[in-house]
Image (spheres, rainbow, N blue to C red):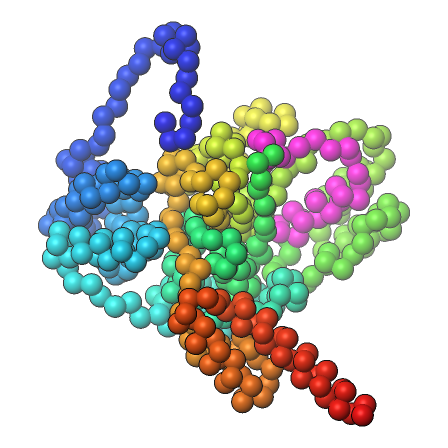
Amino acid sequence: MSGRKGLPKSFLNRFTKIYFSILERIDLKIICQQLYENIPENILDKMLNFNEKLQEEFNNNQWDFNLRDLLKWCEMFNENNFQGFDLIYIKRMRTKKDQDHIKQLYQQTTEWNIQPIEIDFKINSKILQIGSTKWSRESIRLPTLSLTHPLLLMRHQLDQLSSILKCLSLSWPILLVGPSSHSSKSTLIHLLSCLCGHQCQVFELNSSIDTNELLGNYEQFNFQQYAKYQLDFLKQKYILNNQIDLFNQFNYQNKEITIDYLNQLKQYFPSDEIDQLILKSNEEQHFIWIESILIRSMRQGDWLILENVNTCSLSVLDRLNSLLEPNGELILNEGGGQGQVIKPHQNFRLILTMDPKQGNGEISRAMRNRCCEIYIHDQQQFNYYDLKELIHACQIYQTKQQEHFIQIHQILSQKGILTISIVIRLGILAFFSEENIKTNSERY
């Protein structure tokens, strides 16, 4: 039941049960041929051979390989066959043993060679390219997150960034899996968001989240908050990304100032829409339905990170299954929606993150199957130049000191007792210790 509790017999006895068997090889082949006529039959047979062998080898494991994986592989067939295989099958594996085993099955069943994937990084004012994926940059000016968080693009991150960017370009939902402390799952998305110039929102889930909080809730009407909420939609509709920044610095605390500000905005927006918004200021206090950040991101076309999805109730998460389908949509019955169908903006992307060792463990297979799962390892092989940039970011500029800390990192890493965060802390400590020594020497 994929983590769900079974229905009681007293309820099931009132229905006629119909059993659907698992799709057989001929069924999978017919579906793939109908959807992807450009794939030769002999190549499709090899892909099906691999899928069958994979199901046999991992039958009693936590993985579930099915039609969705085959369709994703077929969708990427025109580019690089091994690149699609690597993204869909290898990237989800959490141990090198499983990765090597799948590569071996790939060579045995398809008779295709393992091809090295070269990842190039190019960026200019218009285009971002990582690997074979190109993305049109929407804004040269980076989002506000880059003002508070230093952007460090590490060389060892390019492989993961390339996989994530490919999924984003194909509009696939992404499931990033890895330890909470050192894997930097959300950081990778924020980094891509800044490089692409696209707005990224975060919704952190927990065990107390219910369906209403996931989709929205009723709140007491506040004109200033309502005006800010509506102006975000107007900005998305009428203002180009690089044209003007109207709202980031404005304070909506005062009602009269907000109304004056709205009147000034008539030069940018249609006057009738601004007048309708101002009329709301005369309404009496009442409760209104405020859409959640999920619904707002769907309407505005933002990227949305759902953090710690496995801490949320499975029944609440399954509410999103229809949204995760290709060309998916969400039916909103809450808040007087009366079955309103919400189709996401073409730029909307959904990214889920989880640590399988926390919360409820794994999420339901129904949700995992709909996402492209990527495992982010906590033990990364840092490039020499990456280490120098990290130490330089800690304001340690002397080459000799940088070399000392890199040597410390290499020695302790070989003993398996060190992570890069410890090296950074040592670097910061050394920096302040050196400053303290200089201050004391000048004093005496």
Q: Measured along the vertical axis of the image, is residue 136 above or below residue 427?
A: above
Please determine whether, in this image, residue 75 is positioned above or below residue 226.
below
Q: Nearer the viewer, residue 268 or 405?
A: 405
Q: Which residue range is magenta in the image?
A: 209-237
Relative height, residue 27 to residue 87 (above, below): above
Residue located 78% across and 92% down the image: 442
Given residues 356 and 71, the one toward you in this image is 356
Which residue is drawn at the image coordinates 35% and 70% (left, top)?
A: 119
Between 287 and 313, the one nearer to me in the picture: 313
Query: Does residue 200 show up?
Result: yes
Q: Is residue 231 magenta?
A: yes
Residue 36 position, x and y percent, is 23, 46
Residue 43 seen by the camera: no
x, y percentage for residue 212? 61, 31
Q: Residue 60: horizontal and vertical position, in percent?
A: 25, 38
Report how many numbered discs are placed on residues in the image: 0
Q: Residue 337: image x %, image y %?
A: 60, 27
Q: Does 186 lie within the magenta span?
A: no
Left or right: 217 in relation to 413: right
Q: Residue at x 68, y 63 (%)?
A: 244
Q: In the image, what residue occupies the spot 49% across and 44% down?
A: 358
Residue 214 or residue 392, whichever sits in front: 392
Report the quarter where the C terminus lies: bottom right
In the rendered image, which quarter is residue 146 located in? bottom right
| Residue reaching furthest to the right | 256
Instruction: Give the dominant element type of the magenta stretch: helix, strand or loop.
Output: helix
Q: Is residue 347 left or right of residue 208?
A: left
Quadrant the N terminus occupies: top left
